[in-house]
Image (tube, rainbow, N blue to C red):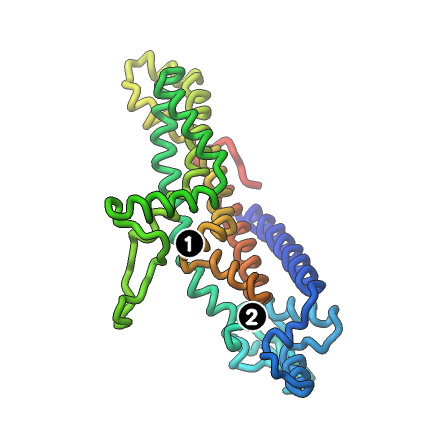
Amino acid sequence: MLRYFFNKLGYGILTLWGVITVVFFLFNILPGDPARMMLDQNENSEQLAVIKKKYGFDLPISQQYLNYLNDLSVISLHSKNTDNYTFFDENKYNGIKLLSLNNSDVVLKAPYLRESFQKNGKKVTDIIAETLPNTIFLAFFAVGIAIFLGIFLGILSALYKDTAFDKTIAIISTFGMSLPSFFCAILAAWIFGFVLNEYTGLNMTGSLYEVDDFGEGVHLQLKNSILPAVVLGIRPLGVVIQLMRNSLLEVLNQDYIRTAKAKGLSMFKIVYKHALKNALNPVVTAVSGWFASMLAGSVFVEFIFGWNGLGKEIVDALNNLDLPIIMGSVLVIATTFVVITILVDMIYAYLDPKIKLN
C-alpha cells in the first residue's frame, strides 16, 4: 500500500509539473504586458521599470520559469540579495529558513501563487481561500444528490428491469446526460428563480454568504445553493443511474447471489448485504472523476447563478486578463484531481478485495 502511494504520488507530481509548464508558457506567449496591466493609463517608464523589477518581468523567460517553479515548490532556494526577485521577503512568502548557504537560503514554505494584477496586489492564495470553499460546498452538494438519488433509482431500475418504470428512468437519465450544464443553468434560473419565484422562494442569483440590505452583517443563505447544485448534479446523476443499474444486474447474475436466493433470503437482504458493495465499484470511479471535473465545470454555472466560487473568479480573471488568478486556479483544480485519483484507487481496493495495490 505504501509503495503504491508513493508511486502514485510521483506520477502526480510529474503530472502537476506538466500542467505548470504548459500553463506558464501558454500565458506568457499571449499578447500584452503584465506590468502595464497592473498600472493605470497614466503609467510612465519609471513605474513600468519598478513593476517589472519587483515581479521579475525584466528577466529572460527561462529564468522566469525557474522562478515560478521555485515559488511553487515547498522547499525552495532564495537569494540573500534584497534586489533579487527570489529574496525571502516575509511579506511575500510564508515559511521558515532551513539552511543558510553562501549566497542563498533553503526555505520550507507554502506554495506562492503570486499576486493578482487587478486586485491591488492581493495574494492569489487569499483569493482562492475565499472562493474555493464555496465551490467545494457546491460540488459536494451536487455529488451528494447524484450519489444518493442515482444509487436509489439505479437499484429500483435494476430490480424492475424492462418495466415501464425502468424505461422511464432510462429516458430521464439519458436526457440529463445530454443537456449542457450552462443551458440547464439558464433554464433553471429563469423557470424556478424568476417565473416560479413566488412558489419556490428561490433566487436567480446569489451566493452562500450574502450581506443584508442594511450592510450590517453576513448571513448564510443555503437556499441559494439549491439551483446550482441541482444543475451541476444532473449529468452525474444520469451516469450514476445507468452505471448502478448495469453493474447491479451483472452482480445479480453471479452464482453467490443464486445461492443466497436458494437459502430463502429476501431481495432486500440480498441487495443490501451481498450485491450492493460489489456493484458500487464502477460508481465510485465515475463519481470521483465527476467530482474533480465539477471544480472545472462549475465555471459557467457559478457565473450564471452569481455564485461566489472559484469558477466565477476564473471568469472574472479571464475578462480582466488577471493571469496569476487563472494560473493558480488551474493548478488548484489539477492538484485536486490528482489527490482524488489516489484516494479513489484506495477506496476501490477496499470495496473489491480482489484488487491489490502494488
User: Left or right of 323: which side holds 281?
Assistant: left
Q: Residue at x 73, y 72 (%)?
A: 63
Whether residue 242 is visible: yes
- Provide residue 265's location: percent of width, then percent of height: 29, 18
Which dot, 1 or 2, sits closer to the camera?
Answer: 1
User: Left or right of 269: which side holds 280?
Assistant: right
Amino acid marked by disc 2 = Tyr
- The foreground one among 182 and 235 is 182
Q: Residue at x 56, y 61 (%)?
A: 318
Q: Is residue 310 above or below residue 151?
A: below
Upstream in the sequence, badge 1 or badge 2?
2
Q: Which residue is mark 1?
A: 136
Q: Quadrant of residue 130?
A: bottom left
User: Left or right of 293: which side holds 41?
Assistant: right
Amino acid marked by disc 1 = Ile
- Provide residue 336's location: percent of width, then percent of height: 51, 53
Which SS class for mark 2?
loop
Which SS class for mark 1?
helix
Query: Is disc 2 surrounded by few (<14), some (14 to 19) or many (20+) residues within 10 Å?
Result: many
Q: Is residue 348 above or below residue 334?
A: above
Q: CA distance from mark 1 to mark 2?
A: 21 Å
Q: Which residue is mark 2?
A: 112
- The foreground one among 183 and 139 is 183
- The foreground one among 175 and 84 is 175
- Provide residue 320's location: percent of width, then percent of height: 56, 66
Whether residue 243 is visible: no
Query: Is disc 1 surrounded by few (<14), some (14 to 19) or many (20+) residues within 10 Å?
Result: some
Determine the residue located farthest toward the front in the rendered image. Answer: 195
- Provide residue 47's location: percent of width, then percent of height: 64, 85
